[in-house]
Amino acid sequence: MTQTLDPEDNKIITLARSARARGGTPEGAAVRDETGRTYAATTVALPSLRLSALQAAVAMAVSSGAKALEAAAIVTEADDPAEQDLAVVEDMGNGTLFLAAPDGSLKGRYI
């Protein structure tokens, strides 16, 4: 899918790619809140806590005072976002969700 993205949207895809690479995890995610602050995270897989990368990034944003998301990005091999990831973006005001491949190429735009 070839699309031109806003530089700020490219930034969160880059942040998600960096988090994924740094953590050596299958997924990385980043979000931009209503004030323009960004948060990046990877999948959390502990015996007592499981969060997708996007859920972790949203939790960081909310715990820092974010009330809404402008945009979110997931970098993954998956062809579609998981239902819980779509739901968490909807919970935060229906910002745009970008799904990107590990090389940063855009696979889809949701919500």
Image (cartoon, rainbow, N blue to C red):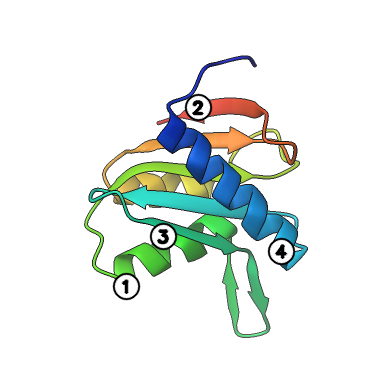
5 relative to 16 in the view: left or right: left
Report which residue position mark 2 lands on. 109
Of labels 4 and 1, earlier in sequence is 4
Q: Categorize mark 3 by other alpha carbons within 10 Å: few (<14), some (14-19), many (20+).
A: many
Amino acid type of the residue that numbered disc 4 sits on in the rendered structure: Arg
Coordinates of residue 34 in the picture (x, y in percent): 24, 48
Alpha carbon distance from label 2 to label 4:
24 Å
Neighbour tally class for label 4: few under 14, some 14-19, many 20 plus, Cα within 10 Å: few
Q: Residue 63 carries which label?
A: 1
Quadrant location of the C terminus in the rendered image: top left
Q: Quadrant of residue 76?
A: top right
Residue on which disc 3 sits:
58
Residue 22: numbered disc: 4
Between the C-alphas of marks 4 and 1, the distance is 23 Å
Question: Which amino acid, mark 3?
Answer: Val
- Tell me the kind of residue under disc 2: Arg
Q: Earlier in the sequence, mark 2 or mark 3?
A: 3
Sequence-earlier tag: 2 or 1: 1
Task: Place residue 63 in its image quadrant.
Answer: bottom left
Q: Say which of 22 and 91 sits in front.
A: 22
Q: Considering only order in the chain, which callout, 3 or 1, is on the residue closer to the N terminus?
A: 3
Label 3 secondary element: helix
